[in-house]
Amino acid sequence: MFPYHNRNITFVYDETLHFTVKCQSINLYIDGQSEPRAHKISLTERGTSYVYRFILNLEKEELFYPWLSHQVFFAVHSPFVPINPFLDGRAMKPGYLYNVNIRLEKELLLPHPYQTNCTDYEAMWKKNNKTGPRSQQKCRDMCTKNYSKFCFGCEKGLTMYENIEDLCSPLERCGRHHCYCKDLHVLLKNKGECIDNCKEECL
């Protein structure tokens, strides 16, 4: 069982089914100034090396919608990249034991003027006093967040939400508040340019 103090809670809004679900993560650092935890694994020792062991025991009071059947989605991803478990995760069946084997691969890209034209988000994060995005997806989400906060006063269109109270209500989400947003076309243009500037990670 993972320690409670090491657990991060975020929220994901399913745009198709129109409901919010809770995500529980270990070693997630999509915001903040902390460094992710590292585990040393010996490649010379025989046998299986476990990094984490999870026991999932779902209770109805933990569900947003208790009348729906229990369902867990599981995903392994970078600590700096917000994901949507409905799209990037795997559905887990109750009563099963799952062993997840991880194979690490390293791909190095080069920044401008090279053709790959990547961004070293980690270097930028350190240069900016440990603030700002640490991945391409977080960069895109920040563009969307700044637009929606300015235009609607709430957040919508993000991959992960860290505070459910900032999530736009259904009325705001369906776009009816567009008429109250001044200079909408300019804001949408700025949002698009901002997202276009979020280049792929160099590492």
Image (cartoon, rainbow, N blue to C red):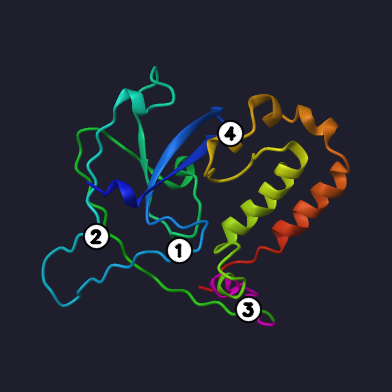
Q: Residues within 10 Å of mark 2 (few under 14, many from 20)?
A: few
- Residue located beneath label 2 in the image: 51
State which mark lies toward you, 3 or 2: 2
Q: Tell me which residue sits at (77%, 27%) in the image.
A: 176
Labelled disc at residue 34: 1
- Sequence-wise, the earlier of marks 3 and 2 is 2
In the image, the segment drawn in magenta is 113-124
- Give the structural element (helix, strand or loop) at label 3: loop
State which mark lies toward you, 1 or 2: 1
Mark 1 residue type: Ser
Q: Residues within 10 Å of mark 1 (few under 14, many from 20)?
A: few
Labelled disc at residue 111: 3
Q: Pinpoint residue 126: horizontal percent, then vertical percent.
A: 55, 73
Left or right side of 147 for 126:
left
* Residue sitting nearer the eye, 23 or 189: 23
Q: Pinpoint residue 198: horizontal percent, then vertical percent.
A: 66, 63
Image quadrant where residue 63 sits? top left
- Give the structural element (helix, strand or loop) at label 4: loop
- Sequence-wise, the earlier of marks 1 and 3 is 1
Disc 1 vs disc 2: Cβ atoms closer than 8 Å? no
Query: In the rendered image of this protein, does residue 61 appear above or below residue 185?
Result: above
Identify the main secondary structure in magenta. loop
Q: Tell me which residue sits at (58%, 33%) in the image.
A: 15
State which mark lies toward you, 1 or 3: 1
* Disc 1/disc 2 C-alpha distance (Å): 20 Å
Disc 3 vs disc 2: Cβ atoms closer than 8 Å? no
State which mark lies toward you, 4 or 1: 1
Residue 7 lies in magenta, yes or no?
A: no
Q: Residues within 10 Å of mark 4 (few under 14, many from 20)?
A: few
Labelled disc at residue 15: 4
